[in-house]
């Protein structure tokens, strides 16, 4: 099914309009609206029709055509986006400081740096690179608000993080009037050649997978090509171009890779530079998360670092040069699993881990808490919420509390764990803690862990509570860590990869 989806997506990009493919009409020397489009990204996190699209392919039936945003409304939004970016460009910014190795990653409000300078996304790798005698810096993008201005809290956080040895710079620091003008001119040039949805309607071949799901892509395509998403793409591309120009001393750019739209902007920009770029798939590739697959199929990186055999096997057929390295965010899984408390009483500790789908996380947490109450179960519940979601919005009983401690520390005390909001169970399951996930609304599984006596997918909160009551007293088990991650605290694979790039 994934192959059919990827083929339909490729067919859309290859569709001919007036003698040229859609893909070629949406790119120039500065921008690539196709590669950075939400259609190409196919993110199930932001596309509420993703699973509907898969169902259409499974059932071989066409979708119902839906309308796109009205032209007048779209143009007003686009004009406002360009105007806001122009105002953001008229302000002073600190000068960037080049380093030999630059890490590109998100800067969430909860970003934490270790005592030795460890990265939230790259673990101890920055420390190891500095130990090898190479300078290190960070280029951050923010995830909330206008792409051209980071929220005040993020700007304050960036100032606290930076130092003379390890500078932390925001991508928005590179927005100037000249960068804004470059983005505007590039965007306008593409708009003159961009195919409309009506033109694609006519060009799509009937009775194909593309014809079945194109109606569900129409609005996404229009927003990505002519809406505010296209403005975001052009501005990101221009800012990345300026960032690489200002950091010309950098030999290596390492980015935390997932296949998102902003990464497409960065990839096209760094391709034109003399620097080496190595994207690192920093989280486990989960079923139906097609962002990395659509990215690699469209633009195979020269080297893509993956941290285990599972991800390697998932991507090896997509014509990219995969390099197996040690998992940087999962090093704690290499330690001996802690002796788990297997209690039969209300003294048991249940760990609840929230996912990035905030609304769903709160809804599922509320359902589980209600099930505990109805079943008269009152264990000690510790909640680790996703950093993008702040804190739970549901009322918590006296036996439940939210913790800001690292997940690895919380796992050590857990008797059983529950995932909500599509959180992945790997951290808990691979530390020997029986883990439970709730069934996704779509019915499509989102975890690479197979159902067993140590992992359960519950249809509802009541079933989850019943399973955890039994699982909390189950004997200790040895999890199959090596099936998912390559672990070695000395990072020999990373060292070998970097040695080939960072030669003096």
Image (tube, grey):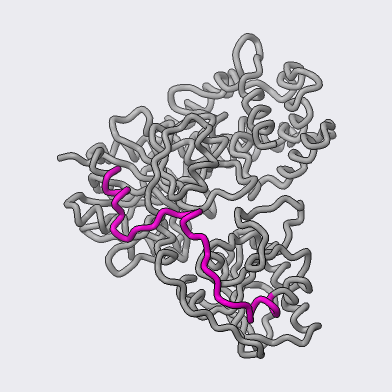
- Rendered residue at 50%/36% (across/down): 316
Depth check, front residue: 61 or 326 = 326
- Rendered residue at 28%/58% (across/down): 490
Q: Residue 418 vs residue 30: left or right?
A: right
User: From which residue to which does the magenta span run?
Assistant: 468-497
Q: Is residue 82 above or below residue 426?
A: above
User: What residue occupies the far left of the structure in this picture?
Assistant: 504
Q: Position of residue 110 (x, y in %)?
A: 46, 66
Q: Position of residue 68 (x, y in %)?
A: 75, 34
Depth check, front residue: 470 or 280 = 470
Depth check, front residue: 128 or 319 = 319
User: Is residue 394 at least partly visible in the picture?
Assistant: yes
Quadrant in which the N terminus is drawn:
top right
- Rendered residue at 39%/57% (across/down): 487
- Rendered residue at 41%/51% (across/down): 105
User: Is residue 175 at least partly visible in the picture?
Assistant: no
Q: Position of residue 7 (x, y in %)?
A: 65, 27
Depth check, front residue: 257 or 328 = 328
Q: Residue 102 vs residue 59: left or right?
A: left
Quarter location, residue 163: bottom left
Q: Position of residue 452 (x, y in %)?
A: 66, 63
Quarter location, residue 155: bottom left
Q: Is residue 306 above or below residue 439?
A: above
Q: Is residue 337 magenta?
A: no
Q: Residue 81 vs residue 70: left or right?
A: left
């Amino acid at each position: 099914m994934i192959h059919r989806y990827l083929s339909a997506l490729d067919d859309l990009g290859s569709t001919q309009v007036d003698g040229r493919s859609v893909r070629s009409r949406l790119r120039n020397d500065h921008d690539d609206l196709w590669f950075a489009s939400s259609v190409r990204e196919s993110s199930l996190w932001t596309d509420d029709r993703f699973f509907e699209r898969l169902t259409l392919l499974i059932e071989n039936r066409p979708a119902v055509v839906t309308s796109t945003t009205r032209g007048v409304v779209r143009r007003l939004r686009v004009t406002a986006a360009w105007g806001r970016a122009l105002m953001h460009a008229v302000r002073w910014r600190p000068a960037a400081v080049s380093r030999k190795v630059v890490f590109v990653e998100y800067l969430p409000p909860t970003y934490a740096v270790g005592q030795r300078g460890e990265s939230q996304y790259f673990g101890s790798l920055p420390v190891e690179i500095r130990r090898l005698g190479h300078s290190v810096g960070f280029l951050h993008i923010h995830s909330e608000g206008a792409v051209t201005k980071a929220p005040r809290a993020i700007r304050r956080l960036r100032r606290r993080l930076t130092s003379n040895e390890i500078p932390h710079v925001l991508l928005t620091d590179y927005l100037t009037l000249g960068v804004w003008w470059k983005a505007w001119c590039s965007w306008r040039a593409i708009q003159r050649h961009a195919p409309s949805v009506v033109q694609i309607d006519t060009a799509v071949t009937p009775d194909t997978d593309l014809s079945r799901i194109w109606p569900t892509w129409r609005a996404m395509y229009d927003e990505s090509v002519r809406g505010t998403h296209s403005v975001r793409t052009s501005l990101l591309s221009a800012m990345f171009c300026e960032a690489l120009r200002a950091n010309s001393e950098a030999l290596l750019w390492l980015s935390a890779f997932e296949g998102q739209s902003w990464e497409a902007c960065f990839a096209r920009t760094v391709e034109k530079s003399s620097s080496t770029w190595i994207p690192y798939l920093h989280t486990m590739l989960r079923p139906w998360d097609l962002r990395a697959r659509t990215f690699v199929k469209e633009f195979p990186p020269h080297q893509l670092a993956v941290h285990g055999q599972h991800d390697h096997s998932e991507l090896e057929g997509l014509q990219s040069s995969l390099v197996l390295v040690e998992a940087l965010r999962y090093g704690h899984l290499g330690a001996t699993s802690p002796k788990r408390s297997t209690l039969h009483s209300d003294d048991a500790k249940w760990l609840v881990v929230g996912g990035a789908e905030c609304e769903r996380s709160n809804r599922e947490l509320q359902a589980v808490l209600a099930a505990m109450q109805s079943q008269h179960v009152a264990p000690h519940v510790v909640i680790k919420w996703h950093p993008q979601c702040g804190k739970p919005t549901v009322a918590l009983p006296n036996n439940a509390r939210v913790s800001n401690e690292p997940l690895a520390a919380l796992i050590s005390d857990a008797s059983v764990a529950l995932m909500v909001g599509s959180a992945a169970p790997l951290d808990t399951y691979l530390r020997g803690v029986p883990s439970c996930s709730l069934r996704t609304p779509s019915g499509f599984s989102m975890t690479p862990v197979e159902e067993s006596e140590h992992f359960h997918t519950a249809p509802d909160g009541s079933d989850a509570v019943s399973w955890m009551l039994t699982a909390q007293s189950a004997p200790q088990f040895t999890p199959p860590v090596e099936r998912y991650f390559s672990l070695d605290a000395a990072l020999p694979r990373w060292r070998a990869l970097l040695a080939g790039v960072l030669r003096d």
